[in-house]
Amino acid sequence: MAPTYQLVPAGFSLAAVLLWGTSDFVGGYAARRTSVFLFTALVHGSGGVFMLLLVLARHSQPPSRASAEWALAAGLFGGISLAIFYRALAAGKMGITAPVAAVLSAAIPAAIGMITAGFPGALPVVGFGLAGTGLWLISRSEGDLQPAGLGFAVLAGIGFAGFYLCMKQAGDGSAMWIALLSRVCAFAVTGAVTLLTRNLHRIPLPILSLGVFAGCLDVSGSALFVRAAQTGRLDSVVVLSSLYPAVTVLLARFLLKERFSRWRLVGMATALLAVPLIALQ
């Protein structure tokens, strides 16, 4: 049995998985009905307001200048990447595009983490392999030679990798402050793109409500990821956190009636099997 301190980052990561997976489902569904960048700006703005209220309520200390700069850089990557990701979710099947982005966003930081922190041990490496295999099985094409939204998913995955790396570099400051600052930059970027492309228009109240809900979930997941990165290895934390497509796929299956094959079911089971192995550092 793993010591408690080894399970703490895994717990933070899995909580982020639940929040991010639900947020992506809500955001991907709502983005089909409005401008992607306008909706993404709404998500980042509402998430920033929500985290600001938490920061004020808890009287959290602001991070150092270096930490704040890395958090803003994370927001730059995350802001554009989330808009591209919503575009991918809106254009294709969530059960395909979400895992593709997750595979890339996990692979790049995990490789860098193993180079900088050293070999994590046999069991975590087996877990990495199982997680990657599971995500590949979930995302593999089944009949379509080029699934819709796949190119956007690849770009989003690369951008999310940059977000993970910058969040890790933000250091040990307040996770809520780091999440808040990243959202400030993300809102500024997506808001500027919205204004420049003149995509301002009225958002229907149901879509507005979904955007606020998705924003609160997304920024909370980011704060949990920061805590996971502060208490654990980057490679383990990123691989675990990148299992969020399993939540998105399940919600798409049961709520939108998207079909997935036996292999996708095997993929999800394989990814879940990887969780305890990665936690045993």
Image (cartoon, rainbow, N blue to C red):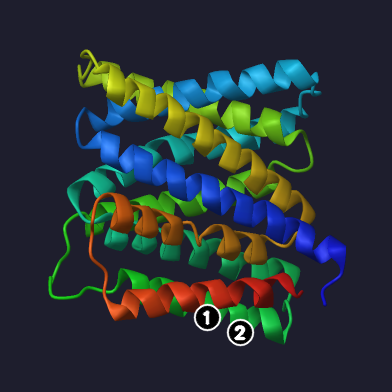
Q: Is residue 50 left or right of residue 207?
A: right
Q: Is residue 81 visible?
A: no
Q: Is residue 199 above or below residue 78?
A: above
Q: Is residue 172 left or right of residue 128?
A: right
For the C terminus, the image quarter is bottom right
- Residue 158, how many percent across, how many down? 41, 55
In terms of secondary structure, where does tag 2 sit? helix
Task: Say if mark 2 contacts mark 1, CB within 8 Å.
Answer: yes
To which quarter of the image does residue 249 belong? Answer: bottom left
Q: Which mark is residue 130?
A: 1
Horizontal and vertical percent for residue 14?
61, 56
**Point 22% across, 73% down: residue:** 141
Residue 91 at x, y percent in the picture: 18, 48
| Rendered image: mark on residue 126 | 2
Of residues 183 and 266, the one drawn nearer to the viewer in this rendering? 266
Q: Quadrant of the N terminus?
A: bottom right
Front position in the image: 85 or 115: 85
Looking at this view, is 250 or 92 the one in front? 250
Relative to 209, residue 81 above or below: below
Q: Nearer the viewer, residue 88 or 252?
A: 252
In the picture, the disc for residue 214 is: none
Residue 167 drawn above or below residue 182 = below
- SS at badge 1: helix
Q: Amino acid at mark 2?
A: Val
Mark 2 crowd level (few <14, some 14–19, many ≥20, 10 Å Cα): some
What amino acid is found at the position of numbered circle 1 in the picture? Leu
The answer to whether residue 56 is visible is yes
